[in-house]
Amino acid sequence: MPDIRSLDYDVVVIGAGGAGLRAAIEASAQKAKVALVCKSLLGKAHTVMAEGGAAAALGNVFPEDNWRVHFRDTMRGGKMHNNWRMAQIHAQEAPDRINELEAWGALFDRTVDGKINQRPFGGHTYSRLAHVGDRTGLEMIRVLQDKGVHSGIDVHMECTIVKVFVVGGKIAGALGYFRETGRFVLFKSGAIVLATGGIGKAWQITSNSWEYTGDGHALAYEAGAELIDMEFVQFHPTGMVWPPSVRGILVTEGVRGEGGVLKNNEGERFMFRYMPDMFKGDYAETEAESDAWVKGDRKKNRRPPELLTRDVVAKAITKEIAEGRGTEHGGVILDIASKQSPDYIKKKLPSMYHQFKELAHVDITKDPMEIGPTTHYVMGGVKVDAETQESTVPGLYAAGEVGGGMHGANRLGGNSLSDLLVFGRRAGQFAASKRGPAPKIPDSEVERAMHEALAPFDREGENPYAVQSALQAIMQRDAGIIRDKAGLERALQALDTLATRARAVGVTGSREYNPGWHTAIDLQSLLVVSEATARAALERTESRGGHTRSDYPDSDEKQAREQIVIKKEGDRMVVRREAQPPIPAELLALIKEGK
């Protein structure tokens, strides 16, 4: 195989966002030889787009906050479907990970007495998000990147992984290619950490960037690992809707956390009409009470209804638009100008101020924003052990968005950034403990994987962009915020046709800088995650969190603790139901009690 480089490592981390960097740092601290592989350039991971903050019960703003309340909020926000042990570990360890990040140089916003400041967010009982204006993810990546580079980690940039090898039931390595040259590289390792993020590019309207094509989900699936909860896709309530060139770009929940309100085209603050029974008593029921909370009296008054969980807010906005109360461009109004001063907005939300000024020519200190739901996050992912983050394939780990279980049916805003730190660290720690000689990968398997990756060059088929565009249209139409049996069955039939088309796509030119080839390879991952989402959504005959069935509009408590598990058997995607372990009585009591 003259056309390939071969490299040996103790641990290979695929993905260089918050989870991947934290895993690599931890594995390196355990004296492992670590490779960090990223699809884009180092520093351009999707984590930099996380704006609002990282949730951790530090108790700096509300001393009464603690891990128990954070755990309760996470479980209630996840509609009781979460892996309870992951939610517990996350709530308990998040404060240490935030303090650790500060010790490494993170410059968080401060309270008047010099502590890390914390802002309110949807679904959180107390102000809990440690933040750096509305650029928290960017600061996190800056700090982790500096720490990682100085830890001696080998970084392989602009490298796409196309195959994870399993030999004798154990992880043996991964095959990738450098996007610049098209040349292959074989990473030999007995421990691989997947930290590849989400699947948002399977939909037309998304806050996700081009990298989010479900690579890690598909690599794990093809390697024989199990996927869970793929029906639970979070549609963030607030993405830009105008102009069309920026449709879907995220508008941070921090706008609502700092006092922004949602209105329909009649000027009504409609969220008061969409209060679920589960949350009554925690949220304001009048505009006066809500405004008092925004002005600072947060101990006496209750949170605005705009800070309900993301699934509730997204569905409320969708209903307002569907019933004719939306804006002319198909959104609703998000207004902070009438609630906060221009200086306050520019200080607390600098990125949002510049984003709307530059992209939409809107001054948010004076005028309202037009927003609507956008595909944002997948709660589902690789099934992992809560303690170690190891998948059902020995030696294969997953952390961050590609790992399933932690967030249940709906993720609370801010929990993703602390999730990256908590479980990235654990994945790196336990992956390093598995170091040792990797099983030898047969040359024939490597050659077969290379041949499959290069196959589009040998065909004069359809343009891969056409297939990708058709897939996104299908998922947007039939597997979006509101689903039903007929639509999901139609989606699966269409995806089957698209899979045939994808196998016949052709690309021209050389392997250097060839975006058509990259798209042809991404298509394989997109097809896997799209089919998994549609099959799981068809199997779950209820509405829960990020999964809404118009033909099954109510939640079925019998299904609350049932997971839909996806696994590859031969050439088939097999779906089964599996009961989750019961929640311990003492934690169940915590969830059911008040503050």
Image: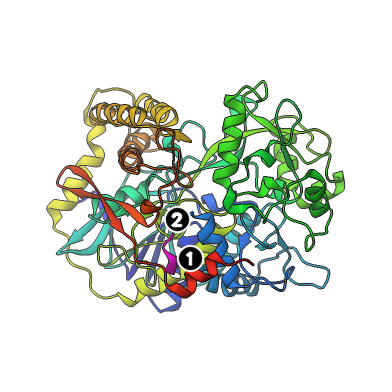
| Residue behind mark 1 | 87
Left or right, 510 with reference to 124: left
For marks 1 and 2, the one nearer the N-term is 1
Whether residue 175 is visible to the viewer of this picture, yes or no, is no
Residue occupying the point 63% across, 29% down: 331
User: Bounds of the magenta span?
Assistant: 80-88
Q: Position of residue 541 (x, y in %)?
A: 35, 41
| Quarter of the rendering occupied by the C terminus | bottom right
Query: Is residue 87 rendered magenta in the image?
Result: yes
Identify residue type, mark 2.
Gly
Q: Position of residue 250 (x, y in %)?
A: 61, 41
Residue 323 seen:
yes
Q: How far apart, in angstroms, are the residues tagged by discs 1 and 2?
A: 9 Å
The residue located at (24%, 48%) in the rendering is 3
**177 lies above or below 71:** above
Location of residue 146 in the rendering, given as x and y in whole percent from the top left corner: 57, 66
Dot 2 crowding, Cα within 10 Å, few <14, some 14–19, many 20+? many
Q: Is residue 369 magenta?
A: no
Residue wearing tag 2: 408
Residue 59 sits above or below residue 279 on the image = below
Question: Is residue 583 shown above or below 318?
Answer: below
Marks 1,2: beta carbons within 8 A: yes
Question: In what element is the residue under mark 2?
Answer: loop
The picture quadrant where one finds residue 529 is: top left
Q: From the viewer's perspective, tell me whether residue 127 is left or right of residue 485.
A: right
